[in-house]
Image (cartoon, rainbow, N blue to C red):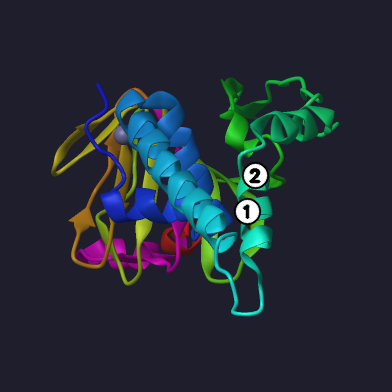
Amino acid sequence: MINHHPKFELIQSFVDGDLPASLSAAIAIHADMCPQCQQQIAELTDQVAEVSFEEAFLDRFIVDENQSIESVGELNADALDIEDMIAQITLSDDIDKVEPVVEKTMLFNNKAYTLPSALNNMSFGKTSHIGKLSRARIQLNENEIHTSLLQIEPGGSVPQHTHKGFELTLLLDGSFSDERGEYVKGDFIMLDGSHTHNPVSAQGCLCYTVANDALHFTQGINKLLNPIGTFIY
Ligand SMILES: [Zn+2]
């Protein structure tokens, strides 16, 4: 069962369209797997739609001093001509097109994963490997924000580390655990500089990751592993 969800503020920004593509895709992927967040998004979207409809509707009744009462009457009749409005909407060609959904799969170490549909139109760099970690960069060109798919093979781990910025891990397949517990498919884990962790995947997993700074390894010999930090970032 999914235990980790995006914070309310993040969902609100998603609905308002204020997130970078990397994070927006993460919310969409999570919501596809999480009925609870899907519902929250639907409710917030309704609220946004209602507010902008009310604003647009009220704007039509703002009358400047030069306008006569008759023209207000006309506007009023206009606004209520629902039949006309529906006729105009159904005239539009835009809504007839239904794009077929093509499932995309991606291979990591001979294991095929079906990608979430939110990633279908994104381009991927080639996959690179260090030990049991494989990473394919997603090319979103968001400057310091780097987005990747990261596969951990069974028995693999990421040495204990922390971050200066944020690190989002969204589990697409499999499971992993760290000091805080076990994470499963759909879990949305947002960490910042105040968190230190050491993810281990017994069964293997595939994650969608977004980070805006390299990982910093925190323990003795792990400090020698900083190339992995750059690799994962
Ligand atoms: Zn959720």
Return the residue nearer the eye: 214 or 116: 116
Return the residue nearer the eye: 56 or 71: 71
Q: Position of residue 6 (x, y in %)?
A: 31, 45
Q: Secondary structure at mark 2?
A: helix
Q: Position of residue 125 (x, y in %)?
A: 70, 49
Asked if 34 appears above or below 80 in the picture, the reply is above
Displayed quadrant of residue 98: top right
CA gap, disc 1 to disc 2? 6 Å
Asked if 209 appears above or below 40 in the picture, the reply is below
Return the residue nearer the eye: 112 or 118: 118
Q: Secondary structure at mark 1?
A: helix
Residue shown at the point (56%, 62%) measured from the top left:
59
Q: Position of residue 146 (x, y in %)?
A: 53, 60
Q: Which residue is mark 2?
A: 77
Start-end of magenta stretch: 204-227
Q: Amino acid at mark 1?
A: Gly
Q: Can you tell me which quadrant of the image ligand 1 is in?
A: top left
Query: Is 221 covered by the magenta stretch?
Result: yes
Left or right relative to 91: residue 167: left
Q: Is mark 2 within 8 Å of ligand 1?
A: no
Q: Name the quarter where the N terminus is drawn.
A: top left
Return the residue nearer the eye: 165 or 218: 165
CB within 8 Å, label 1 to label 2? yes
Q: Which residue is mark 1?
A: 73
Residue shown at the point (53%, 44%) measured from the top left:
25
* Residue 45 seen by the camera: yes
